[in-house]
Image (spheres, helix red, strand yellow):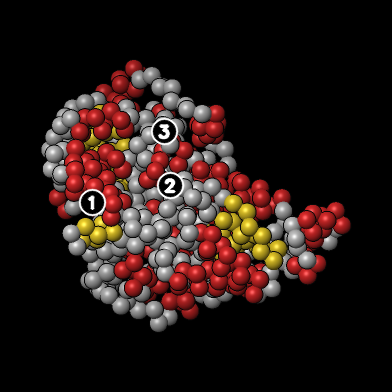
Amino acid sequence: MNSSAVTKTAPQRALLHALGLTPEEMDRPLIGIVSSQNDVVPGHMNLDKIVEAVKLGVAMNGGTPLVFPAIAVCDGLAMGHQGMKYSLVTRELIADSTEAMALAHAFDALVMVPNCDKNVPGLLMAASRLNIPTIFVSGGPMLAGKVDGEKISFSSVSEAAAAFRAGTMTEEKLLEYENNACPTCGSCSGMYTANSMNCLTEVLGMGLRGNGTIPAVYSKRIQLAKRAGMQIMELLKRDIRPRDIMTEDAFTNALTLDMALGCSTNSMLHLPAIAHECGVALDVDIANEISARTPNLCHLAPAGHTYIEELDQAGGIYAVMNEIDQLGLLKTDLITCTGKTVKENIAGCFNKNTEVIRPARNPYSPTGGIAVLKGNLAPDSCVVKRSAVSPAMLKHEGPAKVFDCEEDALRAIHSGQIIAGDVVVIRYEGPKGGPGMREMLNPTSAIMGCGLGEKVALVTDGRFSGATRGAAIGHVSPEAAVGGNIALIQDGDIIRIDIMANEIHFNVTDEELNQRRANWKPREPKITSGYLSRYSAMVTSGNRGAILELPRLY
């Protein structure tokens, strides 16, 4: 066992005695439990209970559990100020620090306990890199809130705040949204990034059934944690490792379910990064190919009016997988953390509510929930959550209103400078240019709150929250900071978007583009700390783990 390096020599055993470990515990496998618990993030405030349940499960099945921490940023709390520059970069910090702790202390296996946006992919990257037996158990989703008998979530408050600014909502009603949108602990209740990644962890085979959908406040979540603790010992006995589970076919399954569920566009950042650590080249160009054959079966908030708790009641992720398997679109002979194959896992897991999970024969749309667009505005690629775009905005043409940061765009939206037909362009918000690739939830929420959701599109080299809805097109590559064509757009240029055709263009000739490029000067990114400065350099140099190293898309 790996742990023999610290349990079989007297100096190291002396330190283990200092921890209060008994000789019997030292003779058992050492299982690292990576706890993302903190008192800052609503999705993580309950993880101490999950961790205690995991520890019990490990001990019940013959292991010695030892807990160490991982950081986690709340994207909602970080939104709209310099904190958002730090969100995406924490993914690399989490992966690197977990790798360091696991190798420095010679753990035999790991149980990852994440919940929120960058925390889940960061730990999946670490698991891939370390490749020792590992299982995941998340903290679970928040229950939806209610106002006037209708379910709401965090993004509802963002849109309500914009409506209040626009004069279409009273302060009293805004306060009602504020007080009722987030009623429990857990990751925000819609199919936002955290829940997308927790659900896709289940699809990848790294989490047990219910990992992505059992609400945080349900006792079933504690039971799930105990089972995960017990199951890691089985994975260790059988020597089943992350790269045995997360194969190329497993990532194809994840992209397929991504399309069926209508997950966050951030999954297009995270899945390639995780695959990269597994030695799998996941080119996002394959997303459109998979989308073309995969029906969209779920319209969870913000795309619709159902929430993760209802997906759980309808049969959860395995029920969606079963629907998709009826079309022959899944690889089902793959081993998973259950010790069984995908086929064995989903057998008998049927759809219990066809309003929440549409049958494969009656989907919301015959194609998937995410689309990758290309054109002279985004020569490499850009991404849109197609399932959250109204039919009226699947095609849009209008003049560009160009801004070099999120704050300038927000001021223009709130002051009424953005009108029906416009295309808001926010640039220099990419990985290098931001730096840090901020989420643009505030601008899209402002557009929705001002009643322009079916009249105005937004294009950015930043990224979008899973809470975003509307014609919000992000991850434009190459980004403005490295001279991508988005840096050359001028106010009034006509932008043409055709989501169903996977195209995005602006009406400038190649000759005019060349002239603009000759006059373009790089901008210095607004560095706000030593770490962000190093991160910007890492992105530029293509360091291991850096977003821009990944094929085709950040």
Q: Position of residue 71 (x, y in %)?
A: 54, 47
- Is residue 77 or residue 533 the one in the foreground? 77
> CA gap, disc 1 to disc 3?
28 Å
- The amino acid marked with disc number 2 is Cys
**Relative vertical location of residue 56 with respect to residue 20 in this rendering, above or below:** below
Residue 182 quadrant: bottom left
Q: Which residue is mark 2?
A: 74
Q: Which residue is mark 1?
A: 176
Q: Name the quarter where the N terminus is drawn.
A: bottom right
- The amino acid marked with disc number 3 is Gln
Q: Residue at x 36, y 70 (%)?
A: 312
Secondary element type, mark 3:
loop
Q: Which residue is mark 3?
A: 82
Q: Residue furthest bottom?
A: 348
- Left or right placement of residue 50 versus residue 295 in this view: right
Secondary element type, mark 1:
helix
Callout 2: few (<14), some (14-19), or many (20+) C-alpha neighbours within 10 Å?
many
Q: Residue at x 44, y 60 (%)?
A: 198
Marked residue nearer the N-terminal end (3 or 2): 2
Q: Residue at x 43, y 25 (%)?
A: 526
Q: Position of residue 123 (x, y in %)?
A: 54, 53
Q: Position of residue 233 (x, y in %)?
A: 64, 71
